[in-house]
Every structure is written in structure tokens, then in C-alpha cells.
Image (spheres, rainbow, N blue to C red):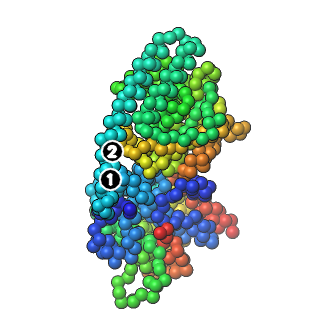
């Protein structure tokens, strides 16, 4: 069964906030000894169902994780109880410092960083293609991203930099927030992939692509998987182009787990450089809950937190092996990232944040149960 | 500093729920936290959609019936009390409860009440009998499209034959209890808390 597989691998370095003990299925659970239908068979489905009502593996990934002890940020506090005067005073001071001093400073830096990015990349874009252009583009991108890192007061620890992604490869990482991009791009140069947006985002995107080849798609093109695959393949074949940065989960997850990787990037047949990013939740809640907060709101919350503390691990490169298909390869990479980051490795699709689960999963369960019954029926008719 | 629950759930309410369901204080606050996280509309009640949003429940073949068990007759919303009352059926039976005073009201998680919960999953029209049709419906939910009508029919017939004692071709609650007397209902229909 789907969720069992993920738990049994024992990757649970992240402390699982589970309130109940989910017992694994025993052979006695269904059909008793005879493997035929028994009226008690529904007990198994009942218990599983109620277990998932009390605590399930998926829905809790789409909201910020609860902290064990309060970090003086109201947003992380689910229970504003007046514990003591001293704590309230501390909190008040915290608010003053964060909103009165840190936030204005950071916002200024952010505007500077973004502004410089747009202006400088446009200028570099005027140069003819060649080594100078690439060199300058690299410098410009790095500098602007580093300013943005300061704007968030991001304290990043990079591990194993010898494994940093190289040209012609694809870098994949777990996705928690748009800030992931800034964190990775301030330590190396990547070709970004994404949909062209309107507004400020679009302006930034259009400027960036002048200086070096990023891969932006029109909204209509995003659905065309062949087109996407072709553009990515073409890009990686050109060894002068930068490694592509992709977040295969396709959506932001709350940094307690890694959810299903979409297989597209793993079909391309080039070296994959996995990267694990883990944020320290005590200093800021980095997860972007896009159904609750818009981007601007989110960024303001980030900039008024204490700091963004995170660790980045560059994992050794991986290639698809003989006899391994794209999905298996994707799962192998996902497992490596989960293990390194201390995250729970889940098979569930991050798309379940918005979409309903596909009926095929229920049909699988029904099939498994039927197999058991039919086996018994056949024995019965034979005897 | 505790979960979201405590300020929004009054102490008196927690005490009442404790008495009614037997859950401990911390279990109640944990489940209240869970209740509020499922309550997307933030109006203090859960609708069927709120349950269906749980993927593991949505893929459970009996998911819809289980969800139904939370909603009283004809209602579309369940509040926290109702939520806890239904969950209470799955509380493990503690040793000190086994020899309780028989004249008191039966606890929600007694063996009989656990069996009643399961019985009601079959008995959709609440006429206190599981008819052949009702049995077939549940069987069909569990097997999907993988077994033919005839095979399923014969499974249903055999089951009723084994259970039916008064010859009315349906299974009453007492007949249901009798068929399952050897089954470890306490273990199969209980969910253990980690804290």
C-alpha cells in the first residue's frame, strides 16, 4: 500500500509529529485464516480510514510545521497565552527590532538588489556573445543575488561544494519557497526554468535572459511536455550553457518532507546534481503557503523574521542507470535528498495541495483486496 | 508552549469531552488541533469535503461510508463534540475499564459499540438489519470492478447463510455479534496514541 512503503524505509530523521501509532498490516487483518471474505474485513479499512482522519501523511505537509518552543514570532505562535510579563516584554522588543530596524533595512537592500539585477543584466545584454559577456553575466548575477541574500539576512551553510553542478547538467532540489532560488543562485550560476509572469516578475525575467540563456516558457507552452523536454535537452547539450535549476516537486512543500518528483527532468539523460535544502524553523518559517499568502505578503514576513537560517548540501552527481526508468531514477534521487536533509520521503504528489487524489489509487486498493478474494474463490471451486 | 487548541477550547468543554469519550486532556487538545487544521472554512464545523481532502481517506474503498459515520442523520456539518464522539469508538479498551460497573452507561469504545460502528457501515438504511443488497453494496465498494456480479452474489449468499439464524435472509445486530464472537474486535478497531 502506497503510504506504507515510504514509512518502512526508516528515513525519519526529522521528528515526525504523529499523534497515533499506525500499525502495519498483518496477514490476519483481511479474510482471517481462510483468505475468504469475512464480515470483519471492514474493520481493517475502518481503522485505516479513522487513522488517516486523526493524522495523515499528506495534508500536514502543506502548512507550516509546528514548533516545539516559541521563537517569539506571533506568526509561529498558535496559542498566544499570557505566560509571563517578561516574555511579553521580550516579544515586544522583538517586534520593535524586527519591524523598526531590520525590516526597513532589508527592504532597502531588496530593492537595491533587484534593481541592480534588472539594470546590470540589461547592460550586459548589449554586449556581443562571448567569453566577456558570460564572465560579466556571472559576476552580475552573483552580486545581485548576494545582495538579496543580505536582504533576507540568510545565513547559509553550504556543504560539499565539490559537488556543485557543472555545465550541461541539471540541478534538482527540494522546494520550500521562492527563496530557494536566491539561496542556490548566490553560490553558483544556473539557468532558471519557469513560466513567464507579468508584472515585476516578468520584468526581472526578461532582463535576466538578456545576459544569459534562461529557459522561460509562455503560459501556453507549459502544458506541452514534448516542447519543454526538447528545450531542456537542447540546453544541456550545449556545454557552454549553465546547469539548469529545477524543482521537480512542482510546488512548495513545508520542508518536513520531500514529495513526488515529476519525471520530466529525469527523462533527459544527462547528469543530475541533487541538492538538499533544509531551513531551520526556529528563525523563520520559510514555507510559502501560497493558498494563504501572496508573494509580497510572504516576502514581507520573511524580511520581518529573525533571519533565514538554512543548510544546503550538494550531493554527488547521479546518472540514470541501465534498466532504470525515469520514475525509478527520480525516486532514487528523491531518496538521496530526503536522507541528507533529514526529511520524510513520500510517494505522494505535491499536487494534492490543490487537486483531488486520482481514482487510480483507490482502484489499486480494490484490486489488491479482490486478488485475495478471487484466490480463495478459485480454491473453493476447485475443491 | 502547547498547541493551537488551548485558548480556543474552554477547560469546561475539555472536561465534558473527557467524561463522555474517555480521551485524556492532551489527546483532546491534539485532536482539536487536528480538527481545526481540517476545518478549511474556519467555522468550527467539518463538512464532507473537509474529510475528502485527506488523500489517504479518499483512496480508502470505504472512505465515503466512514465519513458518513461522523454525520448525524440528515446533517451536513459535524462539530468538535460530534467528531470526538465518533473517534471515541476507536479508543483502545483499557484494563481498568474492562470490569466497570455494569449498571453505568456503556463507554463509547466498548466492544459492543465498536461492533455497532462497523454494523452501521453496512446497514445504510438503519433498519437494524443487513440485507443482501446492503452487503453487496459494501462488497462492491471494497472490490471495485474486479469481481463479477455472480461471484460477488455467491460470496454474499454464503456470508448470510453462515450468519443468519432466524431465517429472515438478513443479518441482525445480534447475529452480527455472534458471527464475530471469536474476532479480536478490541485490537482491530482500536487506534493507539503515541503520547
Q: Going 37% across and 35% down the picture, which residue do you hit?
A: A106
A259 lies above or below A268: below
The C terminus of chain A lies in quadrant? bottom right
Tag 1: Cα neighbours inside 10 Å, few (<14), some, or many (≥20)? some
Q: Are marks 2 and 1 on the same chain?
A: yes
Q: Secondary structure at mark 1?
A: helix
Distance from Cα at disc 2 to Cα at disc 1: 10 Å
Taking the view exactly as shown, the residue that stands out farthest to the top is A128
Query: What residue sits right under mark 2 in the picture?
Result: A97
Q: Quadrant of residue A294?
A: top left
The residue drawn where x is 44% and y is 16% is A122
Residue A238 on image: x %, y %: 62, 20
Nearer to the camera, B139 or A332: A332
Query: Chain under label 2?
Result: A
Q: Which mark is residue B99?
A: none
Q: Position of residue A286 (x, y in %)?
A: 43, 44
Amino acid at each position: 500500500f502506497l503510504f506504507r512503503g515510504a514509512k518502512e524505509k526508516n528515513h525519519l530523521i526529522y521528528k515526525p509529529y504523529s499523534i497515533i501509532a499506525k500499525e502495519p498490516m498483518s496477514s490476519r487483518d483481511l479474510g482471517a485464516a481462510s483468505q475468504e471474505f469475512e464480515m470483519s474485513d471492514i474493520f481493517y479499512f475502518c481503522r485505516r480510514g479513522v487513522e488517516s482522519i486523526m493524522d495523515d501523511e499528506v495534508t500536514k505537509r502543506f502548512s507550516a510545521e509546528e514548533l516545539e518552543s516559541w521563537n517569539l514570532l506571533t506568526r509561529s505562535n498558535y496559542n498566544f497565552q499570557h505566560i509571563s510579563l517578561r516574555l511579553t516584554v521580550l516579544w515586544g522588543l522583538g517586534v520593535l527590532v524586527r519591524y523598526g530596524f531590520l525590516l526597513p533595512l532589508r527592504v532597502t537592500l531588496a530593492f537595491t538588489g533587484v534593481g541592480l539585477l534588472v539594470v546590470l543584466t540589461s547592460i550586459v545584454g548589449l554586449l556581443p556573445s562571448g567569453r566577456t559577456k558570460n564572465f560579466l553575466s556571472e559576476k552580475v548575477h552573483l552580486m545581485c543575488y548576494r545582495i538579496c541574500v543580505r536582504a533576507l539576512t540568510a545565513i547559509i551553510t553550504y556543504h560539499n561544494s565539490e559537488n556543485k553542478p557543472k555545465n550541461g547538467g541539471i540541478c534538482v532540489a527540494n522546494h520550500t519557497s521562492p527563496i530557494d532560488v536566491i539561496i542556490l543562485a548566490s553560490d553558483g550560476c544556473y539557468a532558471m526554468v519557469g513560466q513567464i509572469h507579468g508584472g515585476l516578475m516578468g520584468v526581472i525575467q526578461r532582463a535576466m535572459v538578456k545576459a544569459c540563456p534562461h529557459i522561460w516558457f509562455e503560459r501556453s507552452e507549459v502544458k506541452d511536455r514534448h516542447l519543454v523536454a526538447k528545450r531542456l535537452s537542447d540546453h544541456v547539450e550545449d556545454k557552454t550553457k549553465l546547469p539548469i535549476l529545477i524543482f521537480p516537486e512542482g510546488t512548495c512543500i513545508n520542508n518536513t518532507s520531500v514529495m513526488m518528483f515529476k519525471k520530466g527532468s529525469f527523462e533527459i539523460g544527462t547528469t543530475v546534481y541533487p541538492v538538499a535544502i533544509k531551513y531551520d524553523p526556529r528563525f523563520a518559517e520559510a514555507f510559502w503557503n501560497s493558498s494563504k499568502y501572496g508573494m509580497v505578503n510572504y516576502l514581507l514576513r520573511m524580511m520581518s523574521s529573525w533571519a533565514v537560517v538554512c543548510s544546503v548540501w550538494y550531493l554527488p552527481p547521479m546518472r540514470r542507470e541501465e534498466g532504470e526508468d525515469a520514475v525509478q531514477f527520480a525516486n532514487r534521487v528523491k531518496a538521496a535528498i530526503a536522507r541528507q536533509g533529514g526529511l520524510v520521503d513520500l510517494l505522494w504528489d505535491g499536487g494534492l495541495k490543490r487537486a483531488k487524489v486520482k481514482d487510480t489509487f483507490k482502484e489499486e486498493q480494490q484490486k489488491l483486496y479482490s486478488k485475495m478474494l478471487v484466490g480463495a474463490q478459485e480454491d473453493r471451486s476447485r475443491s | 508552549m502547547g498547541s493551537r487548541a488551548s485558548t480556543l477550547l474552554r477547560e469546561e468543554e475539555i472536561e465534558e469531552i473527557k467524561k463522555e469519550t474517555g480521551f485524556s486532556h492532551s489527546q483532546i487538545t491534539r485532536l482539536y488541533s487536528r480538527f481545526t487544521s481540517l476545518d478549511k472554512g474556519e467555522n468550527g464545523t467539518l463538512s464532507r469535503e473537509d474529510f475528502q481532502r485527506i488523500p489517504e481517506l479518499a483512496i480508502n474503498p470505504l472512505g465515503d461510508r466512514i465519513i458518513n459515520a461522523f454525520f448525524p442523520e440528515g446533517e451536513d456539518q459535524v462539530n468538535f463534540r460530534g467528531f470526538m464522539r465518533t473517534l471515541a469508538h476507536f479508543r483502545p479498551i483499557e484494563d481498568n475499564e474492562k470490569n466497570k460497573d455494569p449498571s453505568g452507561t456503556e463507554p463509547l469504545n466498548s466492544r459492543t459499540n465498536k461492533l455497532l460502528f462497523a454494523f452501521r457501515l453496512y446497514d445504510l438504511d438503519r433498519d437494524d438489519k443487513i440485507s443482501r443488497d446492503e452487503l453487496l453494496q459494501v462488497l462492491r465498494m471494497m472490490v471495485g470492478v474486479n469481481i463479477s456480479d455472480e461471484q460477488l452474489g455467491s460470496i454474499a449468499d454464503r456470508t448470510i447463510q453462515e450468519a443468519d439464524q432466524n431465517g429472515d435472509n438478513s443479518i441482525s445486530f445480534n447475529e452480527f455479534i455472534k458471527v464475530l464472537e471469536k474476532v479480536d474486535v478490541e485490537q482491530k478497531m482500536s487506534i493507539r496514541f503515541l503520547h
